[in-house]
Amino acid sequence: WLFCSEPPSSPQVVEDGAEEDEEELSGGEEADLRSSSGRGSLLTRRGITLRVLLKDGLVEPGDGALAIHYLGKNFIGDLLNDGKIRWVETGQIFNSPSAWATHCKRLVNPAKKSGCGWASVRYRGQKLVQYKTTWLHKYQPSADMSLVSEEDDDEDEEEGKAAVQADEKNKNNKPGLHDVVVSRRADRERIPVRYCTLGTRDAARDPHTLVELSAFSAINRFQPFNVAVSSNVLLLMDFHCHLTTSEVVGYLGGRWDTNTQLLTVLRAFPCRTRLADRDSASAVEEEICQNLFMRGLSLVGWYHSHPRGPALPSLQDIDSQMDHQLRLQGSNNGFQPCLGIICGPYYHGNQGVASTITPFWVVPPPEQRPNDYGIPVAVEVTYVQDNFLTSDVLNEMMLLVDYYRTAPDLVQFSQYWCPDTTMMDKIKGSLSCHAPKDQAYSQILEHVYSQLSSIN
């Protein structure tokens, strides 16, 4: 590739609904939980509570950190310091995820007898059961992981069937609803870890492990450059990422002003090729290089997608970004930043239909710890609204439509992303965040959408 690298009052406490899978432990029992190592310690599956996860830093207290999505209804909860849950809507306090899940589900479906909280409640978009698994991997590495997920899979299956049955009467209007349930269950659950938990590089660590972004201030740094990104860049990038269920990659063209320390991103250059297709890579590189040169632009960064996962860098992404930064800077002594952007179009933890778009940069590890991973940091960006869609952008959009027309991993835009939103509604809603507000450009985009609809 171009970088020569891989790319209220006293609240009511509700205790009903506690399940077998959760028990409160005393402090001494929690200590025993960490030190026990025999086969009998598998019983700790029932004892891994939110309080345990909080104490070990796998989750953190936070307003609105917890959510339940059940039969089209959403419930939001605050995770409290003591591991209890406060339902935002009423202020009620629940002692466990199962108590909260059972209560909420019975409001929607009175026949619901239980609600396995670890499979139903999500923390920052990810199922709590995944954090339980992470805890066991860390403190009980020899544990049989099938014991962790067995009941939770059953719960998911039950809810999936219930969702289909509840919407059966709308089947004629929403033929793709079953596909939604299937695709949600197929989403890869990738739990982000905090950078401080990584430590020294470990060849045995999964390179696809996602890492939370740090703030420059958290590492006692100032962002060493300013960034302005054109809305047309976001529109084309977002469009590209929506077209396929596979990861995509592209490059960013713009200018770097050393006097103002401003990086301006003016164009996106989607790579119309497969990540694994080395044969066509050189031709794609050459075409993009020519386009950059013809427009008087420099290579200033890259983007890629996490189609169904959080828009956070993986360990592999961190290494790639670090490599790109070094190569782009070259051998001269002048500083030139390289911006990385991750787009997450179909992650169900996103807020609404808009894709999550994450600009990031990597700070090298401390000199005294050269074998550590680079530190991924969030980059503050100013988004500049363009007044019109350029012919370049429209041309690239049509080229992308043609490229993916026969692709087996093309998104089926007539299917449903969620019960009341088709994939086409999803892409339109997300792109409307970047498109010029002029009605004329809405009509132009409608033409592009009609081309997409005609494919499948």
Image (cartoon, rainbow, N blue to C red):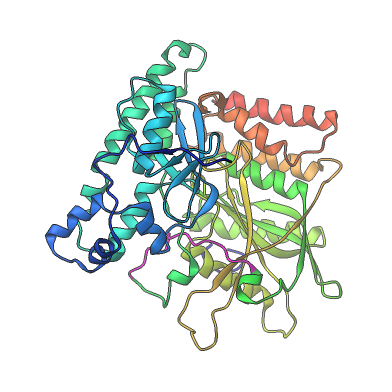
Image-quadrant location for residue 359: bottom right
Quadrant in the picture for the N terminus: bottom right
Image coordinates for residue 208, horizontal then vertical, percent: 43, 59
Is 275 left, or right, of 265 in this rendering? Answer: left
Is 221 left, or right, of 185 in this rendering? Answer: right
Residue span colored magenta: 204-215
Image coordinates for residue 328, horizontal then vertical, percent: 66, 73
**Is 311 colored magenta in this rendering?**
no
Image coordinates for residue 141, horizontal then vertical, percent: 24, 64
Is 355 left, or right, of 94 in this rendering? Answer: right
Q: Residue at x 38, y 44 (%)?
A: 95
Image-quadrant location for residue 243: top right
Q: Is residue 185 visible?
A: no
| Front residue (pair 214, 270) | 214
Is 167 left, or right, of 48 in this rendering? Answer: right
Magenta span: chief secondary structure: loop
Q: Residue at x 33, y 20 (%)?
A: 111
Quadrant in the picture for the C terminus: top right
